[in-house]
Image: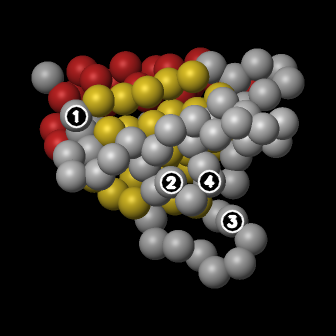
Amino acid sequence: MEVRGVQGTIHFDGEWITITKTPVGPKPAPFRVRAVDVTGTRFKRATRLMHGYVQFLVPGAAAAGEKSGLMQGGRPPASDPHSLSVPHKSNDLAEKLVAAVEQARG
């Protein structure tokens, strides 16, 4: 299952979650974690005017909070490796991905 986000993708194969970001500039390494190692998920649906996000909480890493402001409002910063912004058209697939990860967590 793959969700196309804003400048990146989230891929889930039933066991591993891979977040690959494609920003302008040097390409960072993909973030990869097993679904059973995830301690929680956050999903905020996008509206037609504002992007939403999917965020995975992992042990040993503090969850990035939502930023304020017109361009980034209500989402974690783009530099957070554990989250990805999603557009309105990806809401349904992102919701299914989060449900699949939650089910895989047990």
Dot 4 and dot 2 residues touching (CB under 8 Å):
yes
> Helix, strand, or loop for circle 1?
loop
Task: Look at the image and tell me whether residue 15 can be seen.
Answer: no
Q: Secondary structure at mark 2?
A: loop
Crowd tier of the residue under label 2, counting other residues whose Cα lies within 10 Å: few below 14, some 14–19, many 20 or above: few
Residue kind at label 4, given as amino acid type: Ala
Kind of residue indicated by mark 1: Thr
Q: Earlier in the sequence, mark 4 or mark 1?
A: 1
Find residue 99 and report its image quarter. Answer: top left
Q: CA distance from mark 4 to mark 1?
A: 21 Å
What kind of residue is marked 2?
Asp
Q: Tell which tag, 3 or 2, sits nearer the viewer.
A: 2
Residue located beneath label 3 in the image: 23
- The amino acid at mark 3 is Pro
Q: Which residue is mark 4?
A: 78
Residue highlighted by disc 2: 80
Marks 1/3 in contact by CB < 8 Å: the verdict is: no
Residue that numbered label 1 is attached to: 39
Q: CA distance from mark 1 to mark 3?
A: 27 Å
